[in-house]
Amino acid sequence: MAAQDELNQLERVFLRLGHAETDEQLQHIISKFLPPVLLKLSSIQEGVRKKVMELLVHLNKRIKSRPKIQLPVETLLVQYQDPAAASFVTNFTIIYIKMGYPRLDVEEQCELAPTLLTAMEGKPQPQQDSLMHLLIPTLFSMKYPSEPSKVASPFILVEKPKTVHLLLDFMLDVLMMPYGFVLNEPQSRPNPASPQSSAGNGSAGGVGIPQPPPGMSFYGAKRIIGETPWTPEQLEQCKLGIVKFIKAEQVPEVEAVVHLVIASSDTRHSVATAADLELKSKQSIIDWNNPLIINKIYKVYLGDIPLKTKEGAALKPELKREPVSTRVKLKILPHLLRSRLAADTFPANIQVVYDGLFGANTNNKLRSLSLQFVHHICLVCPDNNKPLGLMLLNGLTKLINEYKEEPKLLCVAYSAVGKLSSRMPQLFSKDIALVQQFFEAMCKDDPEIRLSIQEALSMMVGAYTSLQGALLHLMEALIAAYMEKPEVQVRQVAMKFASTVFAPDHIPSRYLILLAAGDPREEVHGEAQRVLRAFPVKTTEKEGSKPMPSFPEMVSYIQEKASERMKTPAKYTVGTSILPFNPSAFGEIILYLRMCLAHSAGAMPTSQSLADMQDNSPAIASYVRNLLSGNPNSLLVPKGGDSNPVQLYIELLQQLLSAIGGVPVMYCLLEVVSVYPQKLAAKFADKIDWIKSLMNTNKEDMRELAAQLYAVVVSTMSGNELNTAVQNLVKITKDNHSPETQHGAILALGYMVGRYLAKKKVTADTQNQELPMITRSLPENEELIRSATNTIGSFLDSPSPLLTVAACTALGEISRNGALLIPNEGTGFTKLHLVESLLSRIPSGKENNKMKERAIQTLGFFPVGDGEFPHQKKLLQGLMDSVEAKQLELQFTVGEAITSAAIGTSSVASRDVWTCTEEEYTPPAEVKVNDVVPWVLNMILNKYIISQNPHVRQASCIWLLSLVKKLSQHKEIKSHLKEIQIAFISILSDPDELSQDVASKGLGMVYELGNEQDQQELVSTLVETLMTGKRAKHGVSEDTEVFQGGSLGKTPDGQSLSTYKELCALASDLNQPDLVYKFMNLANHHAMWNSRKGAAFGFNMIAAKAGEQLTPYLSQLVPRLYRYQFDPNLGIRQAMTSIWDALVTDKKSVDRYLKEILQDIISNLTNNMWRVRESSCLALNDLIRGRQLDDIIDQLPEIWETLFRVRDDIKESVRKAADLTLKSLSKVCVRMCEPSSAAAQRTVAVLLPCLLEKGIMSNVSEVRALSIQTLVKISKSAGARLKPHAPRLIPALLESLTVLEPQVLNYLSLRATEQEKTAMDGARLSAAKSSPMMETINMCLQHLDASVLGQLVPRLCDLLKGAVGLGTKGACASVIVSLTVQCPQDLTPYSGKLMSALVNGLNDRSSVVQKSFAFALGHVVRTAKDSSVEKLLTKLGTWYLEKEEPIYKSSCALTVHAIGHYSPDVLKNHAEQALPLAFLGMHEAPNEEQGENGDSTLWTEVWQDNVPGSFGGIRLYMQELIAITQKALQSQSWKMKAQGAAAMASIAKQQTGSLVAPHLGMVLSALLQGLAGRIWTGKEELLKAIGSVVSACSGDLKKSVPGQPNIIEVIDLVLKECHKENLRYKIAALKCAADVLQATQEDRFQELVGILIPLINKNSPTSAHTRKSKEDDDDDLDEKEKELQMESLLCAFESLGKAWPKSPATQGQYRLQLCQLMCERLKLSTWRVQVGVLQSMKAYFQGLLLLDKDHTDSVELSEILTKTCDAITFPLENKSYSSVRTEALNIVELLIKKIDECHQWGGLTPDSRNQLINSLTTMESDSRPELGEKATELRKRLQNLS
C-alpha cells in the first residue's frame, strides 16, 4: 500500500512536470520536488526506484536544454551531508549538485562555498574531487575579511585537517596545470576511470599511462581536467582564486608556502605577480628552515622518484608525481638558498644539485642556481657527511671536465670546489691529481676563469697541510714545475702551496719561495718576501718542525743548487759576471741565510734594519767560532770544495757583491768577517783592492761598511802593511777630485786607528805575544796615528757635510778606543778646540741631524777612551746646555752621551760591538777612573729638572732616565733614589705626553733599584704626592707644592692630569700601593718606545715582568681595568688599555670575570664623577654586545633601572653613552627572549616588570620610547611566552598610550570646536591603535586563554573606569573587541563585568571614546548572558527617556546600533526591548550641529535592519511602541515629549486604516493626554498625530468602544488648543481641528469662526501695513513675523474651507459673511494668500447648499455670486502668478458646473456674467496654453448661456 502511495506521488510529480510550460514553473517544481524524489531512490520497492529513474531521465533531458533553470543546490547539499542517507541517494544527489552549482549566481556560489567544503568530509575520493572542482572557480569571487583576526572567516578549516590536506593537494595540482593541456587517454587501457586499474602488474599498468604535465601525476591531471575541462581563462581565474584564498590566511602559512612558490612561476603574468607579491609580504614570517615546508618543496621539485623501497614499489603509476618543469625549478631554488635545512637535507639536496647540473631539461640559469645551491650546501652541511661531499666533488669535477660553454658557470664551479675543500679537507688530502688538474687548467683556460681557479686552489691549500712521504715529494715536484710557468696566477698559487703545505724548516720549499722572491711580478715576489721575512712565532702544526732550516743545511743546499744552475740556462748574466740566480732572488737568499744564521746562533732572526741585525752579532760570533773551530755541531759537510758553511756563505756573499753590490749584502759580509777576524780576515788579504773599490762606490752606507771591512782586514796584517795602508789613506784624503774616495778613506782611517788603539789596549792588558812588531815600532806608529788624527781633524771644517760627518765619525771611533794624540789646549787642532767645535754644531741650524747625532756621540766617547780627558765637565756642561725645541730623538742620543761621558773609562761604549754584549763587558782594571756621575746627577736634579723651560725639563728627564737605566748599579744612583723619584714625579705634571711617560717609566725603574725599606718609602712618597699634590718632607728644598697652584697640571686635552692619580687609586684599592709602579710600566703608549732609541731602554721586557707580577691580582684588576678602557680621558684610556693588553692575554678572561666586571660597572653607573658614569656606560655597552647573558638574567632589571636613571644624567656625553648602552641592551634582551633561547621564559619574566613599571612610566621621553621599542620587539620574539605576563603587560601598555601622548594634544582638544575635537580625537585614537604598544598588545592577545583572563579582565575594568587618556580608553575598548573574537567562550564569565565598566564609560565627553565603548559593547553582548543584555537595554532605555543631556542619548544610539551591527542575533533575541527604543529614537529632531547624520540615522538603521518593513514592524511591536511613546509623552523633558509625539504620529500615519480597537483607543488616549497642559516645543506633533489618526479612523471612532475617546471629546480638546495664544501652535491646532472636522463631518463651525475671523482680521495686510509704518527698525523680526502672519492667514482660510459644514442652519448664518470675507481678501492680499483664499473658496462653493436643488435661495445666491464675480476678476487677470490664475479658473469652472447642475442661471446677473466673460477673454491669450484653452471654453459656455 505504501509503495502504491509512493508511486502515486511520483505520478503526480510527473504530471506536474509535464504541465510545466514555462521555465519558471519548471524551476518551481524542481526546487520543491527534486530532493524528496531523490530520497525515494532508497526505497526498497524496485518499482518505486524504476519510476524515480524514469522521472530523473525526463528531468535531465529538460534541464540540460535549459541552462537558466536553477536547482535547489542548498537543499541538495544538506541532503548530501545526511549521514543516514543511502549511498545510492548521495551518488545521485551529487550529480544534481554538480549540475546546479555552476548555474547559481556568483554571490550564491560564494555563500554555498563553505558548505561544499563541509560536505566533503568523509566522502569517497572521486566525489571529493568533484566538489573541489566546483569549489575552486568560486574562490576568485569570494569576499574575505580585511582583518581575519577580527572578523570570522568564511571557511572554518581549523577543525578539519583532513579536508585542508585534500584541498591543498587539489590546489597544488590546479596551480601545476598548464593552460590548454589535453590528456590523451589511450584506447588500450581497460578501465581508465579507476586509479586502481593498474594494480595487477606494474609493468603493464605503467605502459598505457599517458604522460602527465610536469609536477603532476596522471591521476592528478585527470581530476583537474574533470568532466568539463576549464578554459585557459577559467583556469587563470581558478589560480588567482587560490592565491587570493591563501592571501586571506584561510589555511596555515606553513602549508601554503609551496603553493605560492608554484604560482609565482605561472606562465600568466597576473597569477605570477599576485603570488610573488604575497610571497614578498610573507617573506619575513615564513620560516624557511621548517621541515614541513622544505620536505614539501623537495617532494614537488623532485617528484616521486621510484626508490627501491616498499613505499617506492607500492606507489601506483597513476599516482606517481613527475618532477616539476624547469620554469618552476628556477623559482624554487632561490627559496632553497634561503634555508639552512634545505642544504642539510640529504640525499634530496644532492638530487637537486645533480638534476640542475646534468638533468635532461636543465639550462644555464638552472645550472647557475644549482651551483649557488652547492655553495650554500658547502657553508651549511656538517663536515663529516662523507657521501655528500664525495658526490658533490664528483659532480663538480664532472661539470668542470665536460662543460665548456659558459665561462661564468665554470668560475662558480671552481669556487664551489674551493669552498668544499675548506669544509671537508679530508676528501682532498690524498688527491694530488686534482691539484694538478686545476694547475693545468689555470695554464690553459681564459683569464676570467683563471681567477676562479686561483681562488679555488687558494682555498684548497689547507687540505694538503698534512701530506707525508711520497705524496709530499710529489707535491714538491708539482709546485716546482708550476713555479716557472709564464702565467702569474699559476706562480702565485704555487708560491702559496709552497709556503703553506710544507713545514717552515723544509729546505726545498723554502728554496722555491726564495726563487719566487725574484719573480718580476709584485704579487708573487711581495708574497714570497712576506712569507720569508715573517718569523713563525707560534709552534707550527707539524710536529718536530723548527721555525727555520738550520744554517749549514740551508747554505749547502743553496750552494748545491747554485752550482747546478750555473750549468743551465737558468743562470743570470750581469755585465761580465755570471750569477746562479737573478739579483732580487739572490739578495733575498742572502738575507734568508742571514736569518737562518741568526736563528741557528740562538738570536732573533731579523732582516728589517741593519742596527737590529748588529745587536745579534755577539751571538753569531760565538756560533761562527764554533763552526770554524771544527766543532761537531757543524752538522752538514758538503761533498768536495770548502767544507765549511761559513766559507760557503762568504763565497755567496762575495759572488753577489762583486756583481751587484747592495748594502744588506755588504753588511752581511762585514758582519761575518768582523765576528771572527783572526780566522776570516786573512782570507781577504789578497782582496784588499777589491775592498778598496767598494769604498769608492756612490752609496754612502756602502762606503761606510766597506771602510769598516777594510779596517778589519788590514788590522790583522803585519805592521809594515798597516803603516803603508795608513799612509796610503792619508794620501787619498788629500785627493780633492773625488769626495766619495775621500769619504771612504777618512772612515777607513778612523776605523783602522780605532782598531789599532783597541788592540794596543788589549796588548797592554794581556801582554799578548802575537804582536811584537806593533810594540817595537811604537814611536813611529804614534807619529803615524797623530798625523792620521790631524788629517781627519782637518776635515771637520770641510765645506762638504759628507766629509764633516765622516771626520766626526772617525774621531769618535778613535776616541772610543783610546786617547787622541793631540794637545789638550793651545793653538791649532787641540782637544779643547775639538770639544768647542763639536758643541757648537749641536744647536746650529746649518747642520743636519746626522751630523748632530754623530757630534754628540763623538763628544760622549772622548772621556771613554781617555781617562785623563781635561775637558770632561765642560763637555758635559755643553751637552746639557745644548737643548733645543723639538729635538726629541736627539735627546736620547744626548742622554747616552752624557751617561758615557759621566762614567768615562768604565763605559761599555769602549767594547768591541761585534763580539761582546754590554752585559758581558768588563772595563780594564788599570785604566784611570774619570767618573763624574755625582756632579752630573747634581746638575740634572738641581738645575735642569727644575728649569722653567719645558724642553729643558723634558730633555733632562730623558737624561735622568738614561742615567738610571745604564748606571743602575752605580752607588751614586742608588744613594739618590728618593731625589730621583721626586724629580720624576715633578715631570708627571708636564703637559707633554712623552715627558709624563718618561717620568712614569723612570719611577718604575727607581722603585726596582731600591731595597725593601727604600721601596716602602718610595711608594708612600709617590702615593701621597699623587693623591694630594704636595711634596714629601724630605724634598730637595722646602715643603713646596710640586704642582703649582695646588692642581695636578693639565694634559693636552685640557683635562686635569688624572692618569697617574687613577693608577694610584687602582693600586690603593688592591691594598698594594707599590703596584702603581707596575701600572706605570704597563701604561706604555708612546710611539717613542717603539723607535730604535726608545726600544733600547727595554721597557717591553720590564712591562712583561710587571705583567707577571700583577697576575695574582687579576680578579680584582680585571673589572676596574675593563671599565677604565672606556674612560673619556684619552690619557687614562690609553694607559689603562696598555695595562689591559699586557695583563689580560687570555680572551676568555672577560667571560671568566663577567660577574665581577658587571658588579663593578653597575655600582659605578651612579658614581658622583661623570667620567666614571660615562666609562661605566660604555664599558657595559661593550660587555653585553654579542654576549649570551643567561648567567646574569637576575641582574638585568637592576641594569635597566640604573641605565634609565643615567639616561637622564646632567651631562650630555653621559646621556649619549647611556643611550648607546640601552640600545645594545635592548638588542641583547630581545635576542634572549627568542624561542630558540634556553632562558627565554626567565628573561621575559624578569624584564617585563622593569620595562613596564620603570621604563614606560618614566618621565624621560627617550627612556619611554626605548622601553616601548624593546617591549614590541620582545613581544614579537617571545610569542607564547608572554601569556603568563599578559595581565600585567596589557594594562601597562594601555596606560602608556596616554602617558606617551604629547600633552599639547589634550590642550588643543579642550580648546577646539566640537567638530574639530571629534576629528582630532579620531586621529588620536587611530594613532594609538596603530602605535607599537598596540601592536604588542595584539601579539599578546593571540596567546590568551581562560587561565589568564581571570587576572586580566578586572584590570581592564579598572582601566575602563579610571583611565584618563583618550588613547587608553579607546585601546581598552579595542582590546575587549579582540578578546570577544579571540576567546568568546572563555570570556563569557567576565562579560557582565566588562559590560558594566563599558556602560560607565559611555558618557565620556569625547564622542570618539563613546563610539569605541559602544563598539565594544556591540561585541561583548555576544558573549554575555541574556540577563546582562536585558539589564543593559533597560538601562539604555531609562537613560534615553529620563536623561536630558545629549551625551546619554547619543551613547544609547551608538550602543544599540553597535549591537545591531555586530551582534544581530542578540538584538533579535531582545527585540521587544531594543526596537521600540529605536523607533522612538528615529523621531529625534536632528540637532543643528549634527545635521542629518545625527542619532536618528543610527536609530533608523537599527529599526530598518530588524523589522520586516516599517508597517509590519509597528504592527508587530504595537504595544511596546505605544508604551514607550506614552512614557515619552509623560516625560519631564519637552524635547522628549515632542519626540514621543512625533513617534506617535508616525505610528498613526503608518497604520492608517489599520488602527482598530484596542490599539486605536490606546493611541488616541495617549495623544489626547499629551495635549493637556502648557505649550512646549514639538507639541504640534501631537496635534498632527491626532489629525492623522482621526482622519484615518473616523469610522471606527464613531463606534462606541470602552477605553476609546469619542469624536466629541476629541474635537473639544482640539478646539480648546485652538484658543492658545502662541500663533505657531495655534496654526497647528487649527489645522488639526480642520482635519478632524473635515473627517468627522461634525459641525463646530461657529466655534471655529470665533477663533478664525479675529485671526484673519488681526493678520490682514492693512493692519500689518499700519504696524509696519510704526516699526521700521527691526527688519529681521519683521520678516519672521510677516512669514508667521502669512502662515496664519493661509491656515485660517484652509481651516474655513475644511470645516465648512453641511448644516443648512450654520451655512445660512455664515455664508454671506464668509463670502464677503473671502472676496475682500482676494482683492487686497498677496499672491500666496490669494491662492489660499481661492482654495478655501473652492471648498466653500463645493459645500454651499444654495447650489443644490434642495436649498435654493436665488436672492442670496445672486448676492454671493455678484460679490464673487466682482472679486474673482482680480485673480483671473493676475499676470504675474499662473497658480493664482489656475485656482481662479477652477472656481469659475466649478461655479458654471454647479449653476448648470441646479439650473440657477438666474442667480448670475448679466453684469457679473460680462465681468467674467471679459476676464476670461483676457485670459485666452495666457502664456500657458492650457489655461488659455480652458478660459476660451468657459467663455464660450457663458456666452452660449447669454
Image (spheres, rainbow, N blue to C red):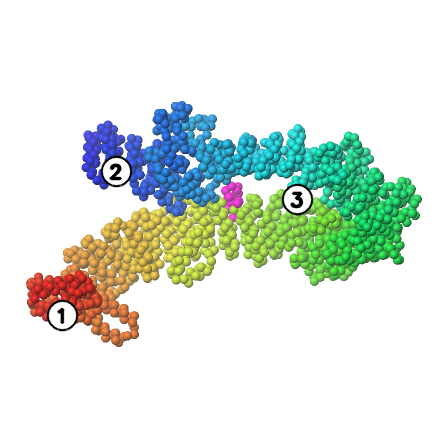
Which element type, helix, strand or loop, lies under badge 3? Answer: loop
Q: Which residue is mark 3?
A: 1145
In the image, taking residue 1517 as reference, residue 1299 lies left or right, namely right
> Residue 438 shows which numbered tag?
none
**Viewer-closest of 1714 and 513:** 513
Name the image quarter holding residue 381: top right
Report the quarter where the N terminus lies: top left
Residue sitting at x 43%, y 40%: 264
Which element type, helix, strand or loop, lies under badge 1? Answer: helix
In the image, taking residue 655 as reference, residue 1373 lies left or right, namely left
**In x, y percent, where is residue 825?**
88, 57
As measured in the structure, the alpha-carbon distance from the residue carrying label 2 to the one carrying label 3 is 93 Å
As measured in the structure, the alpha-carbon distance from the residue carrying label 2 to the one carrying label 1 is 75 Å
Q: Looking at the picture, which amino acid does disc 2 mark? A: Arg
Q: Looking at the picture, which amino acid does disc 3 mark? A: Thr
Task: Work out whether residue 510 can be spotted.
Answer: no
Residue sitting at x 36%, y 32%: 125
Q: Which residue is mark 1?
A: 1766
**In x, y percent, where is residue 652?**
76, 37
| Mark 2 vs 3, N-terminal side | 2
Magenta region, residue range: 1231-1247
Task: Work out whether residue 125 can be spotted.
Answer: yes
**Viewer-closest of 1529 and 762:** 762
List the single residue furthest toward the front.
575
Between marks 3 and 1 in the image, the one whose residue lies nearer the viewer: 1
Q: Which residue is mark 2?
A: 66
Whether label 2 touches label 1, CB < 8 Å = no
